[in-house]
Image (spheres, rainbow, N blue to C red):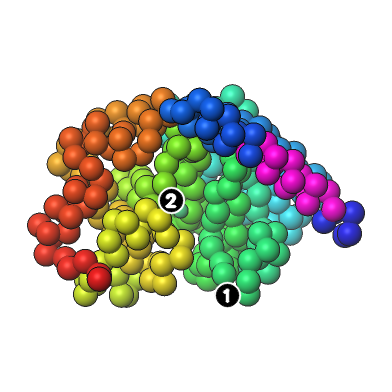
Amino acid sequence: MKTTLRIIRWFHWVFIYILLFGLFFGQIHPGVHAVAWTQPVLHEGNKLVETWRFRDAERIQTEHISLFYPPSLKPQARLIAREAERVYARFEQRYGLPLNDPVPVFLFPDRTSLQEHFFWHKGQSASGVYYSGAIYLLNPHIWDQKLPDPKADPQTWAKRFRRQGPLVHEFAHLYLDKITKGNYPRWYTEAFAQWVEYKEIGYEWTPGSNQRPDALYAYSDLLRHFDDLPDQALAYRESFLFLQWSIRRQGEDSLGKLHKELKRGQDFAAAWQEVYGETPDDSFRQWARQAGYQLRD
Ligand SMILES: [Zn+2]
């Protein structure tokens, strides 16, 4: 265990050095987005570390997916691998996924193992995570008690998992990260992933408080402190609604143009302005005003 931690720490330091080098290089070559240089190395490094951490897991290798899973979840893993291939095919057909290697997907049996893996605190959880080129999934039976036995009724299992599961959302993160080489703010990747989910499977995340909030977080809050905002459901929801409105106004083509600018290494605000003709903050205020929302002080 100690050796494991030492190796993980060592890899983290290597990542930090690479990142610092990238940032320094970005400074001497202004306009070059720093993460673009480091991203392939980081993703490759993460894959190496994770493959090693999951060396005792079982593995399913399909054309585009490498799924690592605990032996107790074999029937689930088979269905998930099949679903992941479907989602992959959909992304490839619709957006063109710029991938050379299979996507690593890691399946965790319970919340504790997922929390320990990411050094999360006890209350923190998720049904899926995208991180550095890989997708991490929690055993679906933990977040959906109504799932049938996957061996007895694989069709219903797969259908429920497709509609409720995090695969489409996490693949959208992966796609955006690869296509823009990591050049986007946090609020945008969450908005985009929710938009793709909405579009592909009609799913919207609307837990309680965020259906008609009293006041919204300002754009600058979303941009600078997305993960620290106390009402995460609201931060996610307003990001989604704002992006959805922008896409409805300018058409879906605008997304492709925005991603192209980001891929070139253009700063997000400048890329947005180029495509939508105004700063993201101005677009945001307009959206909030016409939807009748107040902004928080
Ligand atoms: Zn997300």
Residue 145 lies, with reference to residue 16, above or below; the image says below
Packing grade of label 2 (10 A; few <14, some 14-19, many >=20) is some
Give amino acid for label 2. Arg
Q: Can you identify the residue that label 2 sits on?
A: 186
Which residue is rendered at x = 57% and y = 36% of the image? 23
Instruction: Tell me if residue 17 can be seen.
Output: yes
For residue 168, side relative to residue 52 (left or right): left
Which residue is rendered at x = 43% and y = 28% of the image? 31
* Magenta highlight on residue 140: no
Give amino acid for label 1. Gly
Q: Nearer the viewer, residue 99 or 3?
A: 3
Label 1 SS: loop
Provide the residue span drawn in magenta: 6-19
For residue 271, side relative to residue 83 (left or right): left
Disc 2 to disc 1, C-alpha distance: 21 Å
The picture places residue 194, in percent across and down from the top left corner, at: 36, 51
Q: Nearer the viewer, residue 189 or 9?
A: 9
Q: What type of secondary structure mainly makes up the magenta span?
A: helix
Q: Can you identify the residue that label 1 sits on?
A: 123
Residue 5 lies, with reference to residue 170, above or below; the image says below
Label 2 SS: helix
The picture places residue 55, in percent across and down from the top left corner, at: 81, 46
The picture places residue 234, in percent across and down from the top left corner, at: 33, 66
The answer to which image quadrant residue 275 occupies is: top left
For residue 138, side relative to residue 48 (left or right): left
Q: Quadrant of the N terminus?
A: bottom right
